[in-house]
Image (cartoon, helix red, strand yellow):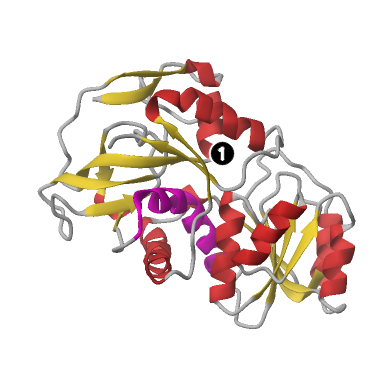
């Protein structure tokens, strides 16, 4: 079968299209014909070696997938050949990824596809949707009527977090890089879109009428805690999910006097049960149209190198020509 293979971490050119032989399905696994996969920043970091992980050689990257069950392991219940499924958490911690025509997936990381939702939406929503859900509910514990700031409202996580927060009855303020992205964020349910380049904290405080915000979802790589903390309401919650190498200043006094909390998490550290809870809500919301996944660009499998470069230019280089997810069409 065709697969994207990586023999040595480094630039995108190290990725190659090659052949890989199927391996037997484990007792707790399902074999999936991968239809669509998606790219995430973590795929870039693992490929480049920025995030050191033990990788099989050759390694197939890719976390997310949508596809069809071809075979089930002897201990698997709830899945059968021919069913459409989706999921994430592949290509991590020694697991082979999803940029291959067939993949063996642990059944606890697979979820039934809702009727009427296409493979592109399912693959594009997987890692980013689970991450957004974990940020809002398990970590920020947002409640109806609260005000939440979601940084980067048209990114993969941000665009879904806006919709989920609105589904929970929260008021959403988000940050964007231009007017086109502002209009998209507002269409997704944000009530205020603040442009980077100005004083975003002043605008956010003004919009909260001086009360401050109840939750802050930080998706940017350089958190500005010196301005975030004064923007928070008493007992507010700050959740950090980016900034692996950041070492920002931190205003300890104002933080503890306000009774704030600060939590950080990485999606791939969440347990299968925790992720399944997220997936249950995501499946329901996709099926009833509560959330949708903006798709920025779709590449065929043989153009994976270009797809990696395109995502890298936009996530690390701030090229500004991507709104939505980057997808890979793996098979027909």
State which quarter of the image contains the C terminus.
Answer: top left
The span shown in magenta is: 117-138
- Residue 88 in the image: x percent, y percent? 39, 48
What residue lies at 49% left-to-right and 61% top-to-bottom?
A: 292
Picture quadrant where residue 212 is located: bottom right
Most common secondary structure along the magenta stretch: helix
State which quarter of the image contains the N terminus.
Answer: top left
User: Mark 1: which secondary structure?
Assistant: helix
Q: Is residue 211 magenta?
A: no
Q: Is residue 36 visible?
A: yes
Seen in the picture, residue 138 relative to 143 is either above or below; the reply is above
Q: Is residue 49 visible?
A: no
Image-based side of 62 in relation to 133, left or right: left
Image-based side of 144 in relation to 277, left or right: right
Picture quadrant where residue 195 is located: bottom right
Residue under pointer 1: 41
What residue lies at 81% left-to-right and 51% top-to-bottom?
A: 196
What residue lies at 49% left-to-right and 56% top-to-bottom?
A: 293
- Residue 38 in the image: x percent, y percent? 44, 41
The image shows a total of numbered marks equal to: 1
């Amino acid at each position: 079968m065709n697969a994207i293979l990586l023999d040595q971490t480094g630039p995108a050119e190290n990725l190659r299209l090659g052949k890989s032989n199927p391996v037997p399905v484990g007792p707790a696994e399902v074999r999936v014909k991968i239809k669509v996969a998606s790219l995430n920043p973590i795929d870039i970091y693992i490929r480049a070696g920025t995030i050191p992980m033990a990788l099989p050689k050759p390694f197939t990257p890719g976390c997310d997938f949508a596809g069809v069950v071809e075979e089930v392991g002897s201990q698997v219940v709830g899945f059968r050949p021919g069913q459409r499924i989706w999921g994430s958490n592949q290509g991590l911690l020694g697991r082979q990824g999803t940029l291959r025509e067939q993949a063996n997936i642990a059944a606890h990381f697979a979820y039934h596809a809702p009727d009427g939702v296409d493979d592109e939406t399912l693959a594009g929503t997987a890692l980013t949707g689970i991450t957004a859900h974990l940020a809002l509910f398990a970590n920020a514990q947002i409640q109806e009527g609260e005000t939440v700031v979601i940084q980067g409202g048209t990114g993969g996580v941000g665009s879904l977090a806006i919709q989920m927060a609105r589904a929970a009855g929260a008021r959403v303020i988000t940050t964007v890089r231009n007017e086109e992205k502002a209009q998209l964020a507002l269409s997704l349910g944000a009530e205020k879109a603040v442009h980077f380049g100005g004083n975003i904290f002043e605008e956010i405080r003004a919009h909260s009428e001086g009360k401050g915000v109840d939750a802050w979802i930080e998706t940017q790589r350089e958190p500005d805690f010196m301005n975030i903390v004064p923007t928070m309401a008493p007992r507010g919650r700050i959740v950090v999910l980016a900034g692996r190498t950041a070492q920002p200043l931190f205003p300890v006094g104002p933080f503890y006097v306000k009774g704030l909390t600060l939590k950080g998490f990485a999606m791939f550290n969440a347990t299968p049960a925790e992720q399944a809870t997220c997936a249950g809500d995501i499946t329901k919301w996709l099926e009833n149209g509560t959330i949708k996944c903006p798709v920025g660009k779709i590449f065929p499998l043989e153009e994976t190198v270009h797809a990696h470069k395109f995502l890298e230019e936009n996530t690390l280089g701030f090229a500004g020509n991507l709104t939505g997810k980057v997808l890979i069409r793996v098979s027909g």
